[in-house]
Image: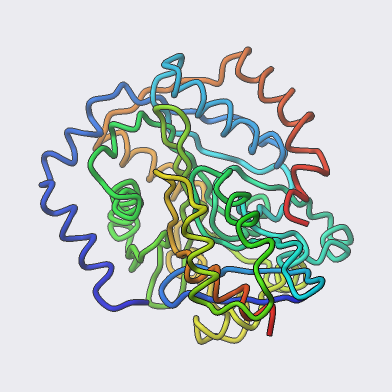
């Protein structure tokens, strides 16, 4: 980490002022989306459909909590399958490989093993902030809340939620029209052996991080709090509600239909997953 | 096919897979865990590297890449110079 980079961003956000920061969030009638577990391809498609719905003003800004129906490696938009995944090992362990529409690094997810959520918001929520600052701004409520739960969480540029024991999770963003998608996956409990078998972590990457394997650099929440996963999730939702306002919403039938079509036509396709072979 | 990786200190990983023929780059695949908007900027960078001589300096490769990045594009966690460094390593 470049020393001071986190500090500069923190200073930029301080300049906005605490009340101005809260006011930005409170401008919107936030909707909470909690749906039954979905397949990995359906999650990818829902993100795209809901982002576009907010971009064209057809949906209120929303917070979606994901539940995973099956295990997956979720590649960043610009990652190569070959470099990141042992596809034979993935198939052997029943882990599907999907590609999300945001950049960043590969995530390994298993049902019950992670906390994943998305924010879909108008770009004006992050107006005047650099991309780097917008990550800090959009993650601040989660970091604060984890701290309130006794987890020594902090934000680390560019897009990490970390702790003294290692990385807890990461965020990724993309923008479409007038809207931003910001999604986050945090590790709750690791399946280290399967993750290590499926994910390839190159030496070049480890050199910079100064660690020897993929699972050593992750510090799952379960190692840092006695709270069960569902409880942490509920607590994060309730913190968002208290801070920013939040009402229960639902994915509409037409959004679900669009997402189903997109999941089949694009996200399940070989061309998209192997966009970078 | 040459393979090069460069982990940007405090930033992201840039990976280049480069095919060479007749002393020039004829094909490049760029990948990594960086952030880039819009996604089309990736193809622009890739195309700009095709035709570069295999002995091109990092500076020359950097110039090719940075000229290709569309105006208003955002690169987060890496730069044109980092792409050039990964390509240079792939050519080594």
The residue lying at 10 percent from left, 47 percent from top is A17
The quadrant in which residue A214 appears is: bottom right
The residue lying at 40 percent from left, 20 percent from top is A60
- Judged left or right of residue B40, residue A11 is left
Q: Position of residue A3 (x, y in %)?
A: 28, 78
Q: Specify the quadrant that holds the N terminus of chain A.
A: bottom left
Q: Position of residue B63 (x, y in %)?
A: 48, 65
Please name whichever residue, B55 or B34, is drawn nearer the observer in this view of the structure. B55
Please name whichever residue, B33 or A17, is drawn nearer the observer in this view of the structure. B33
In the rendered image, the vertical position of residue A216 relative to residue A219, given as above or below: below
- Judged left or right of residue A100, residue A245 is left
The residue lying at 44 percent from left, 50 percent from top is A232
Q: Position of residue A97 (x, y in %)?
A: 76, 52
Please name whichever residue, A258 or B72, is drawn nearer the observer in this view of the structure. B72
Q: Position of residue A148 (x, y in %)?
A: 28, 57
The residue lying at 55 percent from left, 86 percent from top is A207
The quadrant in which residue A9 appears is: bottom left
Colour treatment of the image: rainbow
- Judged left or right of residue B38, residue A142 is left
- Number of numbered discs on residues: 0
In the rendered image, the vertical position of residue A244 relative to residue B15, given as above or below: above
Q: Specify the quadrant that holds the C terminus of chain A.
A: bottom right
The quadrant in which residue A195 appears is: bottom right
């Amino acid at each position: 980490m470049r020393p001071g980079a986190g500090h500069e961003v923190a200073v930029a956000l301080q300049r906005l002022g605490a009340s101005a920061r809260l006011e930005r969030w409170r401008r919107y009638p936030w909707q909470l989306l909690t749906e039954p577990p979905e397949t990995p391809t359906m999650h990818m498609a829902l993100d795209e459909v809901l982002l576009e719905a907010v971009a064209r003003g057809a949906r209120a800004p929303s917070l979606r909590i994901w539940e995973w129906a099956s295990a997956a490696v979720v590649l960043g938009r610009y990652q190569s399958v070959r470099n990141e995944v042992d596809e034979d090992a993935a198939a052997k362990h029943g882990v599907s490989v999907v590609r999300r529409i945001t950049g960043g690094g590969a995530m390994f997810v298993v049902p019950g093993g992670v906390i994943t959520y998305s924010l879909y918001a108008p770009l004006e929520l992050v107006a005047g902030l650099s991309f780097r600052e917008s990550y800090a701004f959009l993650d601040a409520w989660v970091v604060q809340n984890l701290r309130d739960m006794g987890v020594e969480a902090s934000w680390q540029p560019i897009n990490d939620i970390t702790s003294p024991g290692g990385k807890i999770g990461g965020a990724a963003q993309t923008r479409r029209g007038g809207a931003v998608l910001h999604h986050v996956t945090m590790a709750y409990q690791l399946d280290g052996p399967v993750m290590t078998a499926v994910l390839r972590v190159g030496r070049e990457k480890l050199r910079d991080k100064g660690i020897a394997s993929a699972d050593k650099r992750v510090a799952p929440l379960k190692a840092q709090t006695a709270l069960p996963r569902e409880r942490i999730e509920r607590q994060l939702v309730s913190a968002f509600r208290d801070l920013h306002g939040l009402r229960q919403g639902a994915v509409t039938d037409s959004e679900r239909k669009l997402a189903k079509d997109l999941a089949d036509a694009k996200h399940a396709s070989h061309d998209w997953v192997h966009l970078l072979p | 096919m040459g393979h090069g990786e460069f982990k940007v200190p405090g930033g992201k990983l840039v990976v280049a897979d480069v095919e060479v023929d007749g002393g020039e780059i004829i094909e490049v695949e760029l990948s990594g865990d960086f952030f880039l908007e819009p996604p089309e900027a990736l193809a622009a960078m890739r195309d700009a590297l095709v035709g570069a001589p295999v002995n091109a300096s990092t500076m020359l490769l950097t110039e090719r890449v940075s000229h290709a990045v569309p105006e208003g594009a955002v690169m987060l966690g890496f730069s044109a110079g980092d792409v050039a460094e990964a390509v240079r390593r792939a050519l080594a």
